[in-house]
Every structure is written in structure tokens, then in C-alpha cells.
């Protein structure tokens, strides 16, 4: 049975089909939520709210976009809403665009595909870098680069203009690259 | 001259950030590609940005069995888990 057939069954009230959709997407939704929320409890809460929303709205789902696109949009906005209600955390400012790209400091990285595949050490380094990035930037980087949304789709999902998406994406990429550069660069 | 060269690189690096993952064969990207072919510094930058994205794509957090069970319970679908 393909996904559209499962969705059709779920829309007709088939609870088993509904649970199949949940199982199909729970890992994706949780991973995505964690990468934005940076907190296990918040990611689990976001996952629950997202699937509660899906269960409530599945009959209205038109199929014009992919179900995954709809789920990513719900997760993004839920995480942003939680972040806005908790402003205690101070993130690195990315306002100084000139400081993000230092042409004199561009070096080769001592990193091989094997290292990327291993991913354990890199995970910790990235984890620290991502934590410094505010959710507003993280979500753009996630939707655009990790999930493969277009610039327009990203803007539509979280209510940003195309220039605003491009600006945030550019700064987020440059910031993360700079953070990893401290570990991987050589030959300066 | 040096200043002009750096400014050009910076513009290219900014543009890489805008267009990475999009169609680099578009007319607006042709000059970027030409610059990339001849500029060592920009090639390194382009590569490192690509590697950053690649690293993060491979980093994954798993749903715990407890979180999975709680989710199905909240949704009222726990009886469908093994079907």
C-alpha cells in the first residue's frame, strides 16, 4: 500500500491506517523537532502536538502538498512559538554579516567522507555549534538545507519573505561553517 | 588590487550561500562558476559549506521506545501499534 492509499484509509476513519502514518513519520518528525528545539522534552512535546494536529485535520488534508511538508511546517511553527515564549536563552548574534565571512580565513578542511559517515565526534561538535544558533535561523537552515524545501516553500512555511529566508540561510550557513572551521581547518 | 580581489571573493561567497543547492547552471550563476573554477579560496569555502550541510544531514536523534508508546497512548492509537 502506498502513502496516498494509507492517507485515504485514514481519512475514511481507519485507525490502523492512522497509526501507520504516525509510525511512518514519527522518527522524521522527532529528529526534525529535536534539531530545532534542542531539547528532548520539547521535541517529544512538539512531536505529540504535531500528530494530534494531524489526527484532527487528516480529513481536510487535500494532498496538494506532501504530508511530510505539512508535518515539517507544523513542527517548525510549534518550535518557533515555544522559543518565542521562552526568551531566557541568549543566542549568538548574526547581525554583523561582515564578520561571518572572513576571506582571509578560508582554509581546507581536514575531513574525509569516512569521518562524515562515522559522525560520532562530529555530532558533538555540531551539537555545540547549533546550540548557539537562534531557532529563527535554525529553522530556516533545517527546512532549506536539510529537508530540501525551496526558498519559496521555506518562506511560506514560516511566514517569511524570500529575501528574509535567503538572508537567514546565508548567515546560518556561514556561522555553522565558521564554528566547524575551528575544528577542521588546517594549512592556515 | 588586493582589496578589489577580496571584495569579489566576498561577493562570490555570499552568492554561494544564496544559491547552494539550487540550479548552478542558471544564467546568474555562470559567472559564479567561472570564478569558482579559478579561485582557490572560494573553492575551499564552497566545499566547507557543502560539508557542513552534509554533516548535519547525517546527524540523527532517535525516538525512544517510551516516547513512541506515550505518543500512541496520547493519540488513542496504542491498541493499533502491533497491527
Image (tube, coloured by chain):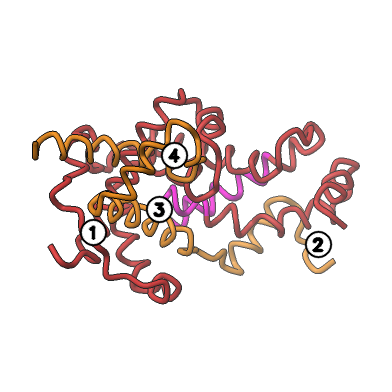
Chain colours: A red, B orange
According to the picture, the residue beneath numbered tag 4 turns out to be A140
Residue A16 quadrant: bottom right
Quick check: A57 above or below B33?
A: above
Q: Chain of mark 3?
A: A
Asked if both marks, 3 and 4, belong to the same chain, the answer given is: yes
Is residue A44 one of those drawn in magenta?
Answer: yes
**A186 horizontally vs B58: left or right:** left
According to the picture, the residue beneath numbered tag 1 turns out to be A181
Q: Chain of mark 4?
A: A
According to the picture, the residue beneath numbered tag 3 turns out to be A38
Q: Nearer the viewer, mark 4 or mark 1?
A: 1
How far apart in space, not on screen, are marks 1 and 2 (Cα)? 49 Å
Secondary element type, mark 2: helix
How far apart in space, not on screen, are marks 2 and 3 (Cα)? 31 Å
Q: Looking at the image, is mark 1 or mark 3 earlier in the sequence?
A: 3
Q: Name the residue rendered at 39%, 54% in the picture.
A: B50
Residue B12 quadrant: top left
Who is closer to the viewer here, A183 or A157? A183
**B54 horizontally vs A87: left or right:** right
Amino acid at each position: 500500500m502506498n502513502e496516498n492509499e494509507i492517507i485515504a484509509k485514514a481519512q475514511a476513519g481507519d485507525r490502523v491506517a492512522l497509526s501507520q502514518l504516525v509510525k511512518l513519520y514519527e522518527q522524521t518528525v522527532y529528529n526534525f523537532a529535536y534539531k530545532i528545539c534542542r531539547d528532548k522534552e520539547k521535541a517529544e512535546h512538539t512531536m505529540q502536538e504535531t500528530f494530534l494536529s494531524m489526527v484532527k485535520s487528516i480529513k481536510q488534508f487535500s494532498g496538494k502538498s506532501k504530508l511530510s511538508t505539512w508535518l515539517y511546517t507544523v513542527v517548525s511553527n510549534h518550535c518557533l512559538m515555544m522559543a518565542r515564549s521562552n526568551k531566557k536563552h541568549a543566542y549568538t548574534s548574526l547581525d554583523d554579516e561582515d564578520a561571518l565571512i572572513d576571506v582571509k580565513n578560508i582554509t581546507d578542511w581536514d575531513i574525509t567522507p569516512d569521518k562524515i559517515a562515522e559522525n560520532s565526534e562530529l555530532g558533538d561538535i555540531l551539537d555545540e555549534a547549533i546550540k548557539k544558533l537562534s531557532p529563527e535561523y535554525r529553522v530556516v537552515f533545517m527546512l532549506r538545507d536539510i529537508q530540501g524545501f525551496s526558498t519559496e516553500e521555506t518562506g511560506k512555511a514560516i511566514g517569511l519573505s524570500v529575501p528574509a529566508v535567503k538572508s537567514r540561510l546565508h548567515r546560518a550557513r556561514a556561522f555553522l561553517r565558521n564554528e566547524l572551521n575551528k575544528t577542521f581547518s588546517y594549512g592556515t | 588590487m588586493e582589496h578589489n580581489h577580496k571584495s569579489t571573493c566576498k561577493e562570490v561567497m555570499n552568492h554561494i550561500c544564496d544559491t547552494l543547492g539550487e540550479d548552478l547552471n542558471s544564467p546568474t550563476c555562470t559567472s559564479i562558476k567561472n570564478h569558482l573554477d579559478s579561485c582557490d579560496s572560494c573553492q575551499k569555502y564552497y566545499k566547507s559549506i557543502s560539508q557542513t550541510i552534509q554533516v548535519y544531514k547525517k546527524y540523527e536523534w532517535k525516538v525512544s521506545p517510551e516516547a513512541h508508546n506515550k505518543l500512541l497512548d496520547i493519540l488513542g492509537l496504542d491498541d493499533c501499534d502491533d497491527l
